Amino acid sequence: MLNLTGKNALVTGIANNRSIAWGIAQQLHQAGANLGVTYLPDPKGRFEKKVGELVTPLNPSIFLPCDVQNDEQIDTTFAQIAEKWDKLDILIHCLAFADKKDLSGDFSATSRDGFTKALEISAYSLTGLAKRAKPLMKEGGSIITLSYIGGVKVVPNYNVMGVAKSALEMSVRYLASELGSANIRVNAISAGPIRTLASSAVGGILDMIRHVEEIAPLKRTVTQIEVGNTAAFLSSDLASGITGQVIYVDAGYEIMGM
Ligand code: NAD
Ligand code: 0WE
């Protein structure tokens, strides 16, 4: 049985009730995990209020702002964890960002700044968080990130985010190789397209979802809860032999050639 009681899980990337991270948080909570939640702070404090209200029913014992571009905020988050929890077991990395102008048109038009920003937030941040999680995962642990097929095959307009996901998936392998000796597993879930705050800001996302619904073996796309269930599995001792992998939760779309 899937049982996460006695496990402490830090979940990043909840923006609203459509976030994949919200689907993951709910399923970790349902399996008995104790949650910590971080959110991206904004000047008006809107996320703090919205995300705070959303997660209250899950009783998080840690709730903090954490912009992954800000080393001080990352340090504060992990200092809080070290203070409040005897150990960290699960880290969910569920965030990405690229400038909107870099998610359409010519890939060759990507600026140095746009490239750097997308890779810093969407790929480097996993390593930044893993570095701080390592000493707190005293009984081993499970680190999970979210990827997309656009990091392996060309998806029109995904552009610099595809390069970032490619770097993210390779970071999963290098981290898994290093952290294995501490019994810390590192895996990625490559999800099919889901309507979220991030994806809705992308032109044509509904057409992409419709395309997947037509082609994928299961003739549909996936839900945040299905991704959450896979994250709960990967977080649990049921997945004790799995590390360094990219697991597709995409209704089978990835296997199709035509
Ligand atoms: P979302 O908008 O709900 O989540 C993205 C999160 O990234 C937000 O919570 C946002 O606050 C956070 N974020 C952005 N910049 C940040 C920063 N500097 N510091 C900290 N947090 C920051 O959208 P989502 O679709 O749930 O995305 C979550 C993850 O899932 C991303 O890695 C995305 O690439 C991946 N993914 C999404 C889909 C999809 O179709 N929605 C498919 C596969 C993978
Ligand atoms: O990873 C993602 C979304 C990533 C994303 C989305 C945005 C939109 C708003 C990162 N940064 C931003 N920045 C913004 O300003 N997905 C897998 C969803 C997605 O995004 C696409 C897709 C799919 C699918 C972009 C182009 C083409 C397909």
Image: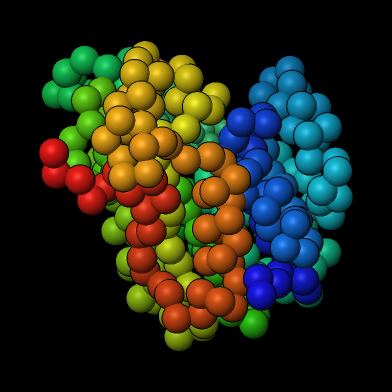
Q: Position of residue 98 (x, y in %)?
A: 39, 28
> Left of 164 or right of it: where is 185?
right
Corner quadrant of residue 107: top left
Q: Which residue is at the front of the view, 230 or 203?
A: 230
Q: Which residue is at the front of the view, 244 or 255?
A: 255
Q: Quadrant of the N terminus?
A: bottom right
In the rendered view, how is the structure colored?
Answer: rainbow
Corner quadrant of residue 132: bottom right
Q: In the figure, 175 relative to 42: above or below? A: below
> Left of 180 or right of it: where is 49?
right
Residue 113 visible in the displayed image: no
Please tell me which residue is depicted at 64% across the width and 82% down the height of the picture.
139
Residue 4 visible in the displayed image: yes
Taking the image in four quarters, ligand 2 sits in the one at top left
Q: Position of residue 108 (x, y in %)?
A: 14, 24
Q: Which residue is at the front of the view, 143 or 192?
A: 192
Q: Quadrant of the C terminus?
A: top left
Please tell me which residue is depicted at 82% across the width and 48% down the height of the picture.
58
Q: Position of residue 117 (x, y in %)?
A: 38, 33
